[in-house]
Amino acid sequence: MAVTDVNTAKAEEFAHQTLSTVNGAMLTLGISIGHRAGLYDAMAELGATTSDELGRHAGLHERYVREWLAGQLAGGVVEHDAATGSWQLPHEHALSLTRAAGPNNIAFMATGVAPFADLEDDVLDAFREGGGVPWSRMERLQAWQSELSAGYYHHALDAVLGFEPELVQRLQEGIDVVDVGCGYGHAALRVADAYPASRVAGYDRADKSVAAARAEADRLGLRNVAFEQRDAADLERETFDLVLALDVVHDLAKPYETLRAINTALRPGGLLLMAEHALSEKPDENVAHPLAATFYTVSLFHCLAGSLSEQGEGLGIAWGESGIRQALGDAGFGPARRHVLDGDPFNVYYVAGKDRA
């Protein structure tokens, strides 16, 4: 392309956009520090404060706190009164940055950037050599994901189960439930705690995840839940009334085989409750999604890379509703009911039983 063919205004606009993206990424690391060090929580408690007061309150060294505050000011996160030397976190910002914000705490989301960045060299090697990134390299990332899912399912799982009122009644009466790819077991633990008459199992291939889930079950004193290190595709001859597959099937090396195994394991009248991301299989249809770029990066570093490390299907995070429905039908499920939660544009829930045909 000749230089004379370049749209100069478009080039400058894109350069500014890219610089802003990189600047935001660097600011994100500062936001992560703010969450992990408890600085936002401390500022919310103190109101207007100096860097020295903030450091003492948070148990941190003042010089680091002062440098962090300067970066946060530059990023529009905090406010500064140069005359008094005081710093303040506006109440409106605290609603997105403090632990008191609960599931609205975006600062926690920022702490996920560094665990993904840890995998950059591994992913680059996979670009060049093929294959993927083994799940064993993702322990730090999986710990972050576990904390994320713990907060989400603590608030959302009751509503998700409520999509099927008869299912809630059956859980109250007592049924057999398995959570495949359970991770640290947050969903399984929530079900076991809320429905003590039901019997809950959690399967995951990661031994550390299973150990953490067992420890939490012991801490909570739950006797109706058990965790095993198992492949989700290997349900043997067990049978269940409810199978949970929450944001997991697209990660698997053998997703289609797993769905067939789940179908075989379901008792008559049993249900699969499956969560997947609200994305199309067509990239151009995802451009308007507010977190599409984030989701594709998550897929590149985690979902796709993990599956391909086991010579798997490599579905990626965006296999889309048509792909999901096709896979469910091929596995022997009847038409799936589709549900979404108000205020959650990121997840879609599919509920399906055996095809009676």
Image: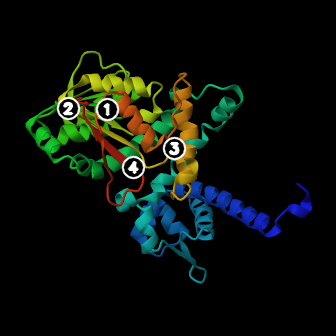
Residue tagged 1: 213
Task: Write the residue at 62% across / 63% down.
Answer: 67
View extreme (top): residue: 237
Task: In the rendered view, tell whether residue 335 sits above or below residue 13.
Answer: above
**Alpha-carbon span between mark 3 and mark 2:** 28 Å
Q: Secondary structure at mark 2?
A: strand
**26 and 20: which is toward the camera:** 20
Q: Earlier in the sequence, mark 3 or mark 1?
A: 1
Q: Secondary structure at mark 4?
A: strand
Relative side of 121 to 59, left or right: right
Residue tagged 4: 347
Task: Name the mark nearer the viewer: 4 or 1.
Answer: 4
Name which quarter of the figure residue 323 lies in.
top left
**Alpha-carbon span between mark 1 and mark 2:** 25 Å
Visible residue check, residue 59: no
Looking at numbered disc 3 in the image, what kind of residue is underneath it? Glu
Image x and y of residue 256, in percent: 42, 26
**How many other residues sit within 10 Å of disc 3, few (<14), some (14-19) or many (≥20)?**
some
Q: Secondary structure at mark 1?
A: helix
